[in-house]
């Protein structure tokens, strides 16, 4: 009996050893998985801290493009480089002869002359009088910012003095004047066009236009500017839209026929 009992103990010990080995392998696998998860969470925590408190050294493509908008002048400027005879845009083409003169020929010209005072028109060598030998000319482009002025429409009213003297009913005649764009408003056609073009062509919001007008001393709220735009769109641009629509319809009908 003792012999069989010893054999049973060996079998039980063998089974226990196999179970322990399996348990150890399972625990090692779990430890490896937990370690990998821990490393991942630590990396995410580090990246979160870096985004929150640190300046990232790597910029996205959109961020780099936005930075270029502010650095465009510094990036493109070449102070020591003379104005070239070849104009570079996205390709090179030879400029036409006299291109600058052709570009400037229709612009108004303001001439400023510089002369020596009479008392300085004396030769520094012999003391004799100086005479005008030639001139040196330099041209510059002058950009005039938006200017605002009042257009005062004055319509004269006429009456007959003879009718006034003889107590006859006096006819009153008033010189005709253009109708206002918006009755009771300061807006003119040019002002309305200015606001609309800056809003939809230049992409300048109304609050920015309000600030721009305020800088030149004109206090007009963005609500007023919005009212002008809506009135102009509904009253005037609708007419243009309807006319263009009818023209397109007629053109399509003719092309079909």
Image: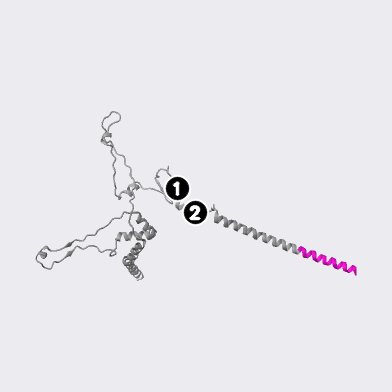
* Residue, disc 2: 64
The dot on residue 151 is none
Q: Is residue 162 above or below residue 215?
A: below
- Where, quadrant-wise, is the C terminus in this rendering? bottom left
The numbered mark, 1 or 2, whose residue comes first in the sequence reads: 2
Query: How many marks overall?
Result: 2
Question: In the orientation shown, which residue stands out farthest toward the top?
Answer: 126
Of residue 205 and residue 243, the one placed in the foreground of this image is 205
Residue 254 percent coordinates (x, y): 33, 69
Query: Judging from the image, what secondary structure is the residue with disc 2 in?
Result: helix
Query: In the image, is residue 7 part of the stretch drawn in magenta?
Result: yes
Query: In the image, is residue 98 part of the stretch drawn in magenta?
Result: no
Drawn side of residue 61 relative to residue 135, left or right = right
Drawn side of residue 132 relative to residue 51, left or right = left
Of residue 238 and residue 231, the one placed in the foreground of this image is 231
Query: Judging from the image, what secondary structure is the residue with disc 1 in?
Result: helix
Which SS type dominates the magenta stretch?
helix
* Residue, disc 1: 74
- Where, quadrant-wise, is the N terminus in this rendering? bottom right
What range of the chain is rendered magenta?
A: 1-21
Residue 76 percent coordinates (x, y): 44, 48
Residue 98 percent coordinates (x, y): 34, 46
Q: Is residue 43 above or below residue 142?
A: below
Drawn side of residue 206 relative to residue 18, left or right = left
């Amino acid at each position: 009996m003792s012999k069989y009992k010893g054999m049973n103990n060996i079998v039980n010990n063998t089974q226990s050893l196999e179970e322990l080995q399996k348990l150890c392998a399972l625990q090692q696998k779990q430890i490896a998985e937990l370690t990998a998860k821990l490393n991942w969470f630590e990396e995410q925590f580090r990246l979160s801290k870096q985004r929150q408190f640190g300046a990232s050294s790597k910029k996205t493509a959109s961020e780099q493009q936005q930075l270029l908008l502010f650095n465009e002048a510094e990036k493109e400027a070449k102070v020591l480089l003379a104005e070239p005879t070849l104009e570079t845009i996205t390709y090179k083409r030879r400029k036409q002869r006299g291109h600058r003169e052709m570009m400037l020929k229709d612009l108004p010209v303001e001439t400023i002359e510089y002369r020596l005072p009479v008392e300085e028109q004396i030769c520094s060598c012999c003391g004799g009088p100086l005479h005008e030998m030639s001139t040196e000319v330099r041209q510059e482009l002058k950009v005039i910012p938006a200017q605002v002025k009042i257009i005062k429409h004055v319509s004269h009213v006429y009456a007959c003095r003879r009718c006034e003297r003889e107590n006859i009913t006096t006819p009153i005649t008033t010189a005709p004047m253009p109708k206002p764009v918006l009755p009771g408003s300061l807006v003119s056609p040019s002002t309305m066009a200015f606001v609309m073009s800056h809003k939809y062509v230049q992409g300048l919001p109304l609050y920015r236009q309000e600030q721009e007008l305020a800088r030149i001393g004109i206090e007009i709220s963005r609500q007023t500017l919005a009212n002008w735009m809506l009135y102009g769109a509904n009253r005037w641009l609708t007419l243009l839209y309807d006319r263009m629509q009818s023209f397109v319809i007629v053109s399509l009908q003719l092309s079909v026929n």
